[in-house]
Amino acid sequence: MEFAQSVRLNIRLNNNIMEGVTMVFTRDFRQTLPVIPRGTRADEIQACLKSSYLWNGIQRLGLTTNIQVHLNSDPSAQQFADNLLQLGNGAITPDNQDECIAMQRIGRIVKIQQELKEAVFPNVSQHFFNYSWLCQRAILAPRNEDVSVMNKKLLQELPSRVQVYKSIDTTCDTNEAINYPAEFLNTLEPSGVPSHTLELNIGAPIMLLRNLHPLSLCNGTRLCIKKLMPNITEDTIMTANAAGEDVFKNRHDNNHATGSAMRLLLISNKYFSLFLV
């Protein structure tokens, strides 16, 4: 935002914020703070939009209705949404000893992963083609390693055989190929990109990671695997306006950067742009 302001100032020599032009900035401010590599808490706060000198010139407008909860008409979902808002507003008092927040009103506390799996996906082998049942369930974890472990356990409970798909990773600069062999590139897990090895099974719920069609196949669309082929998957859309429609997905080419500011590496991947959910 500050960069756009400086560019406009240099070109138009107008000191007004954004030249006085009405501009809309959208963001979910309840997400995590900006990630500053090797930065301190002060660095993260300084990188926030509210720390910008332009913040006082912005009119803040907020969305107050949770449309998903409103459409479902589920009292428990509304209570859960209200509890999350209280948590984000700091209205839930943490424990005086360890400063932890009790989650009894927000979620269910379990001791082992097996108990969590049984609570969220009971008898998954009997309900995996019930799309409304699948859409109401998800397990969130702070680390990708935990997600992979849970996904493997759930995949093993589906009646079909698990199939493994591997991405094709290369460097965009052929001169760097000798320095970064494919075995090393396969170990990288950039944000928003599936792992090199993707295990899938018929009946498993998946999430699309890129925009393919504005009305039906957008980033975040949930699908259920119907058929697995060597280079194509047939999936059924479970959400949005096209719920119930079958689509075919193939591998996509994608270029992305990874590394640090001192050493940036451009990688080309060919993979299925989806995650298990």
Image: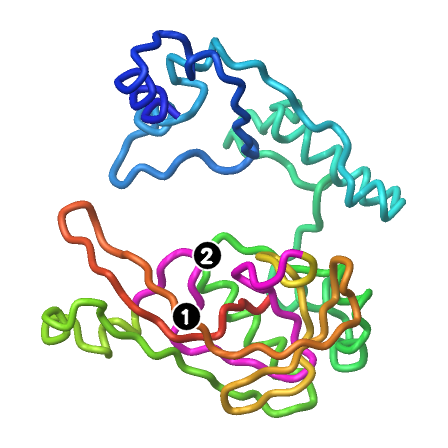
Residue 36 to residue 136: above or below: above
Residue 27 bears which disc, if any? none
Report crowding for label 2: few under 14, some 14 to 19, many 20 or more residues within 10 A (C-alpha). Answer: few
Q: Is 190 in the magenta?
A: yes
Residue 216 lies left or right of residue 123; in this view the side is left
Looking at the figure, which quarter contains the C terminus? bottom right
Name the residue nearer the viewer: 166 or 113. Answer: 166
Tell me the SS state at disc 1: loop
Q: Quadrant of residue 122?
A: bottom right
Quarter of the image that includes the N terminus: top left
Return the residue at label 2.
143
Q: Look at 41% across and 70% down and name the residue there.
A: 195
Tag nearer the camera, 1 or 2: 1
Identify the amino acid type marked 2.
Arg
Q: Nearer the viewer, residue 192 or 268?
A: 268
Q: What residue is at 35 percent from the left and 22 percent from the top?
A: 2
Q: Identify the residue at horizontal 30%, vertical 66% (top origin).
A: 188
Tell me the element at label 2: loop
Q: Main secondary structure of the magenta part?
A: loop
Residue pushed farthest front?
Answer: 12
| Residue bearing the label numbered 1 | 195
**Dot 1, how many residues are within 10 Å of its Cα: few (below 14), some (14-19), or many (20+)?**
many
Q: Position of residue 177 (x, y in %)?
A: 14, 74
Mark 1 or mark 2: which comes first in sequence?
A: 2
Residue 139 x, y percent position in the rendering = 63, 59
Left or right of 120 in this view: 178: left
Disc 1/disc 2 C-alpha distance (Å)? 13 Å
Magenta stretch in the rendered image: 188-214
Q: Viewed as shown, does residue 112 lie left or right of 78?
A: left
